[in-house]
Image (cartoon, rainbow, N blue to C red):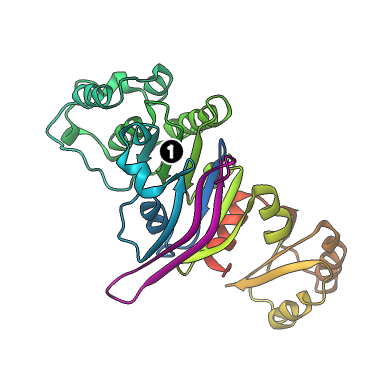
Amino acid sequence: MSKQFIIQVDELQLSFEDGTAFNFNDINITKGKITGIIGPNGSGKTTFVEAVLGLRKLNKARIWIDGIPQKEFFKDNASRKVLGSQLQVFAFSELVKVSEMIALHKALYGKQSNRVYEALAMDELLNKRLDKLSGGQKQRINLYMALAHMPKLVTLDEPSAALDKNMAERLIELLQYLSDVQNCSILMITHHPYELDICHEIISIYGGTKTYHASREVFLNDIIGAFHAQIFIGDNENATLIQAEVNNIKHVKQHFMQGNQIDIYGQKTMEVGFLALIKKHQLKSYSFGQSNSADILKISTSFIG
């Protein structure tokens, strides 16, 4: 197995009683990078991560974690200690205090990071019982339990869910620190542009399988289209004609209409044809600019696949 990758999935197949099937092949996740997993709700993002973590019964599996076969990895206590996971479910007893959770973490892992403790503002929660915490505060506990031992590999499932803006920003800074300074490998399911902004690589999942796996730059430039134009048609009587004429604009990679808005993705060179269309139909409401993480998420959750 290559030392370049923290997770290698040659084959991963599983199915459910309702006939739903998932099939993932040839996924190699680079060490020391932040890898975002995106796709529509129900596409298989969480199922994929849980399967890699050994939390799903698999029909077929050839998976390596840090160069170790998956089953052997989870049998070895030392290997498990280099892993940190935050799942969507809050799985701790709610009758204990936060200070007791922190003590439990120390007993399990033997070390804790002051950087993580301060970033997640644990001090203000120490004397509170878990059942008295808000959703955002519980999420901070989940994240602390996943990150405080500075693991080599972290899996996160929508980590900023329920966090306020300030805490979400602190989390983003912390994840960047873990990756850039501590060489931590982070696998993160996300629906938020600001989380996707810090990802080095992106995996899109649609219909229970991988559709793309590429760097963020490749996603923007080659898969989505480096530039994004919008036309707001309103009640324009030429709406159907305008949409048809978008097909004639050179260097457009993809376009679609939702309601009274046409979104167009492609290269910078499509601007000439785009502006000519705007002038021809005397359109007053339009925009043209570079694509960003919000565009990646918009396309991946609705149209890729």
Which residue is located at x 47 percent, y 29 percent? Answer: 170
Q: Is residue 300 visible?
A: yes
Q: Residue 107: which quarter of the image? A: top left
Q: Which residue is mark 1?
A: 154
Q: Which residues are magenta?
A: 1-30
Indicate the secondary structure of the residue bearing disc 1. Answer: strand
Based on the picture, tell me whether residue 201 belongs to the magenta stretch.
no
Which residue is located at x 22 percent, y 21 percent? Answer: 103
Q: Which of these two is toward me, 195 or 103?
A: 103
Q: Is residue 233 visible?
A: no
Q: Is residue 161 left or right of residue 276?
A: left
Which residue is located at x 49 percent, y 42 percent? Answer: 67
Q: Main secondary structure of the magenta part?
A: strand
Q: Is residue 250 left or right of residue 97?
A: right
Give the answer, above or below, for where 257 lies relative to 170: below
Q: Is residue 14 left or right of residue 34?
A: left
Residue 223: image x %, image y %?
68, 60
Give the answer, above or below, for where 278 lies relative to 168: below
Q: Residue 77: which quarter of the image? A: top left
Q: Amino acid at mark 1?
A: Val
Q: Is residue 48 left or right of residue 172?
A: left
Residue 167: image x %, image y %?
42, 31
